[in-house]
Image (tube, rainbow, N blue to C red):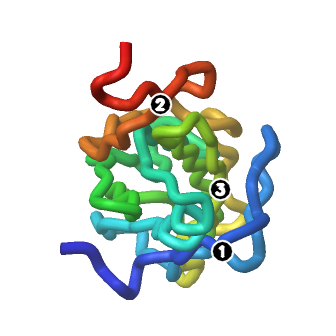
Amino acid sequence: MISAARTVVAPSQGFTAAGALVASPYLVWPTAEPGDNLDYSLDLTAPLEDVGDVIATVTLTVSPSGTGELSYSRLSVAGDVITWWGAGGVAGRRYLVSVTAATGYGRAFSYVVALNINPTLAAYPLPPPPVPGPGAPISVTSAATRFMIPSNSMYIPIGWG
């Protein structure tokens, strides 16, 4: 079961990350605590219903990364909802989670969602992250499939030929 409180709903259009790690002001998970180990979800129902498609594979990365930073694991897909688990993180740090979902018809939906770690216990200035960019990607393949007919195929009624 996923947490409704930690589920971000993607809009039907816009806010894609075309190669840039820029978080939309509209896509932010609730502030986490440095000791949390919780599930976070991204609901792609609206953009997928808009085009009649399904999630085939998902890839996720987190920036910044490295020892002592937010760790991420357990990526899964249930219908149109992508869920991952995040643990730890540096107090006061803002993490950018890049999620790319490839679909059965070959579309790619990319979102960058921010996850802020509560700054209450932060020691300023914050130490620089070991790796300012994304960590190693994690991926999952969905069990959802769609029967697809290649665009260059031809329909021949039964009994012909």
Instruction: Check the picture and name the quadrant holding the C terminus.
Output: top left
Is 112 located above or below residue 148 in the figure? below
Question: At 74% from the left edge and 62% from the top edge, which residue is drawn?
Answer: 23
Can residue 93 be seen in the rendering of this structure? Answer: no
Q: What number is the disc on residue 11?
A: 1
From the viewer's perspective, is the residue at label 2 or at label 3 nearer? 2
Q: Return the residue at label 2.
A: 149
Looking at the image, residue 143 sits to the left or right of residue 94; the answer is left
Q: Return the residue at label 3.
A: 111
Which one is nearer the viewer's eye here, 63 or 84? 84
Instruction: Check the picture and name the quadrant holding the N terminus.
Output: bottom left
Nearer-N-terminus badge (2/3): 3
In the rendering, at what x and y percent does residue 31 appear?
Answer: 52, 80
In the rendering, at what x and y percent does residue 24 appear?
Answer: 76, 69
Nearer-N-terminus badge (1/3): 1
Classify mark 2: residues with Cα within 10 Å, few (<14), some (14-19) or many (20+): few
- Disc 2/disc 3 C-alpha distance (Å): 28 Å
